[in-house]
Amino acid sequence: MDIQRKIFVQVPSYRDRQLIPTLTDLVGNASDPDGLRIVVCWQHDTDESLDDFVASGFRHSGSTRRNGHLVHLMDKDGAIVEVIDVHFLDTKGCGWARNASQGHYEGERYNLQIDAHHRFIAHWDAAMIDMLESLRGRYEKPLLTGYPPSFDPAVFPEGRQNHVGQMLVRKFSTLGIVSYRAARMPGWEERTEPMRARFMSGGFVFSDGRFVEEVMNDAEHFFSTEEIIMAVRAFTHGYDFFHPHRPLLWHQYNSGARKVWDDHTDERKSSGEIEGSATDRAVLALERSLSLLGISEGHEAVDFGRYGLGRHRSVQQFERYAGLSFRHRGLRSEAAEPTEPDESYYDLPVNEWEDGLICKRAFRVRIGNTRPLPGSVDLDSVVVVAYAADGSELVARNLSPGDLEVLAAKGCFEYIDRFEACPSRLPAQYDLQATSKSPELSEAFAIMVHELGEDAVSATS
């Protein structure tokens, strides 16, 4: 296929020994290496040097400064390679690194966003362009994305996965941020076109080049918030997502490379080696994400500038499309199953839409005494009742004789309540009803309820 214009390839690499093998494979398997312009944000220590690139066949033609960074100018087999040189303690995370690479975009026709640990099919560039353009007649702004099949660099091509998958919701955090899991695409061998996708992967996006300008990565995002925010922003800018129905590249998962949170510790922040720790950046990214999604409480409005939402669609339309609710931390059952998005959800009344959501919650319920107890505690019964917002009873737990013995002996008793229900059938209030032959004991206990985090909720899956 005649590739008329260059592909802009953006690669963040953090102390990753697979960077050079990835670039070599990227160029070596391209049908037109001259059509590639690769920009790497090379976050490294002194154990990596330019000599490593030269030894692998990259020609270093000079260095310059751009956007405040030293940039090494290279080429390999016709491909242009620009390497942004960043010491690993000067980086600010993956979102920052992607943003740094994207700042070098120069109007290329196509954009490929990847990580630093991939392998590629032969003629991947022509295959990606053909697949993307096959969608153009029905979708103005299609893009390809997803979690590529896995490979092990030690034995590749042996052991590589040869099926394709799709992204599904794994769980919500207690604040409403979504994480994903990969599932095999059903019937992919028989498919003749890509599959509609609900979400985007940060590690693989192939799109028109204008995506880089319209949905440039917010440098403040830090890993766990990157993918969902990118998807919402892209959707509101009018992009339609598709999972490839054939393998185009492979991804190394769970590599042994060091991660930024291994190095950017609170201790290094205290010593002055870094400006902010990984924890600091994660908190900031979370606050920005909640504000962008419209679910933050008690925070000032944020001016996102070019990193905000588009005007083609709303966040609420994305929720209907993807089959989830950020505010309610719930999803339609189909969003967790290998299905394509159901656009009929756009027209559902709000109450009908919310009644179809499944919200998973886990609460630690603790009953404790509010005053010193007498030596002998004689409780007849203790009942804990959970009520919905409309006042209807959801569940009542009558403590067993054994539970009462624990409460009497220790002055406290706790258990975990788990729910999988629509928003209107989640607990809004807990009440405690204690009875005893001693009237003062009936008022001697109080109840405390605390929502648990992701791991406790996922235990119900």
Image (cartoon, rainbow, N blue to C red):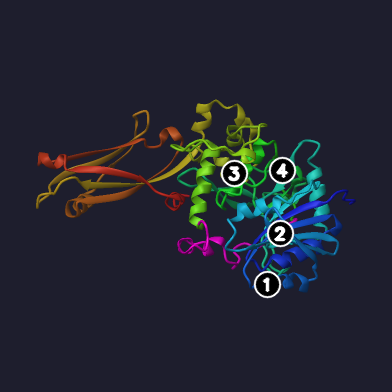
Residue 190 forms part of the magenta stretch = no
| Mark with earlier residue (3, 1) | 1
Left or right of 25, for residue 337: left
Crowding near the residue tagged with mark 2, few <14, some 14–19, many ≥20 C-alpha atoms within 10 Å: many
Q: State whether residue 123 is above or below residue 214.
A: below
* Callouts 3 and 1 close, C-beta under 8 Å: no
Residue pushed farthest right? 2
Amino acid residing under circle 3: Ile
Residue at horizontal 32%, vertical 44%? Answer: 449
- Please give the range of residues in magenta: 248-276
| Mark with earlier residue (4, 1) | 1
Residue 260 forms part of the magenta stretch = yes
Marks 3 and 1, how far apart at CA: 34 Å
In the image, which disc is placed on residue 334? none
Question: Would you name the residue on which mark 2 appears?
Answer: 40
Marks 4 and 1, how far apart at CA: 37 Å
| Mark with earlier residue (3, 2) | 2
Question: Would you name the residue on which mark 1 appears?
Answer: 154
| Mark with earlier residue (1, 2) | 2
Amino acid residing under circle 2: Val
Q: Position of residue 169 (x, y in %)?
A: 56, 47
Question: Would you name the residue on which mark 4 appears?
Answer: 213
Q: Is residue 83 visible?
A: yes
Quarter location, residue 445 = top left
Helix, strand or loop under label 1: loop
Quarter location, residue 29 = bottom right
Amino acid residing under circle 1: Ala
Left or right of 221, for residue 125: right
Q: Nearer the viewer, mark 3 or mark 1?
A: 3
| Mark with earlier residue (3, 4) | 4
Crowding near the residue tagged with mark 3, few <14, some 14–19, many ≥20 C-alpha atoms within 10 Å: many
Q: Position of residue 3 (x, y in %)?
A: 87, 50
